[in-house]
Image (tube, rainbow, N blue to C red):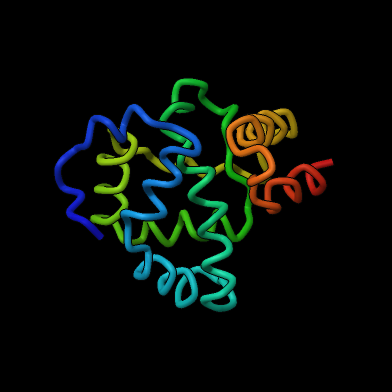
């Protein structure tokens, strides 16, 4: 990974596909993938790489959506397990947030699943940014939430 110590204002102002591409090409997520398999319940590295793709789509909108509170949510899934793996690598996660979102983003676990309306909002927003490139896991979120 390139050094993420210095905030990159241009990254912090990006969202969606442009930020997703930068994250995908600039950051070495190898340690996160290893942590996801070793400590977070993801079956293997292939599954972890697949979940990372979904996580990067979700994360790429996180900075822009911090202001909407509980409407932009995460569902318990392999995508969430990747987020937890990133958080377990504290310095990495802090630097990732600072450089690519402009500020650290806290994790606020929910008791149970998020409200259906919030899941729908999240998936609709992701779909509006990623269109036909939307990771299939997000459609599964809708199917599973009712």
Can you give x and y, in whole percent of width and height, for residue 27 in the image? Answer: 32, 57
Q: Nearer the viewer, residue 71 or 23?
A: 23
Closer to the camera, 113 or 99? 99
Q: Name above or below for residue 120 compared with residue 5.
A: above
Instruction: State which quarter of the image contains the N terminus.
Output: bottom left
**Residue 21 versus residue 100: which sits nearer the camera?**
21
- Decide: is 112 above or below 124: below
Give residue 60's position: percent from left, percent from top: 46, 40
In the image, what residue occupies the spot 68% across and 31% down? 124
Say whether residue 38 is left or right of residue 89. Answer: right
Residue under the image location 23 percent in, 55 percent down: 91
**Coordinates of residue 30 in the picture (x, y in percent):** 37, 69
Q: Quadrant of the C terminus?
A: top right
Q: Is residue 90 left or right of residue 77?
A: left
Residue at the farthest right position: 146
Above or below: residue 85 compared with residue 58: below
x and y percentages locating residue 134 in the rendered image: 65, 45
* Picture residue at 51% right of the left edge, 24% below the top: 69
Q: Looking at the rendering, which quadrant does residue 142 occupy?
A: top right
Q: Residue furthest top?
A: 67
């Amino acid at each position: 990974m390139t050094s993420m110590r210095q905030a990159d204002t241009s990254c912090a102002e990006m969202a969606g596909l442009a930020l997703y591409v930068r994250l995908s090409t600039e950051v070495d997520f190898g340690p996160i993938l290893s942590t996801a398999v070793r400590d977070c319940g993801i079956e293997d590295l292939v599954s972890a790489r697949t979940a990372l793709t979904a996580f990067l789509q979700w994360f790429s909108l996180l900075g822009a959506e911090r202001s909407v509170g509980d409407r932009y949510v995460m569902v318990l899934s392999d995508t969430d397990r990747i987020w937890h793996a990133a958080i377990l690598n504290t310095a990495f996660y802090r630097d990732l947030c600072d450089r690519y979102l402009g500020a650290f983003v806290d994790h606020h676990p929910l008791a149970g699943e998020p409200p259906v309306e919030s899941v729908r909002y999240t998936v609709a927003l992701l779909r509006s940014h990623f269109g036909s490139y939307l990771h299939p896991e997000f459609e599964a979120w809708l199917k599973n939430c009712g």
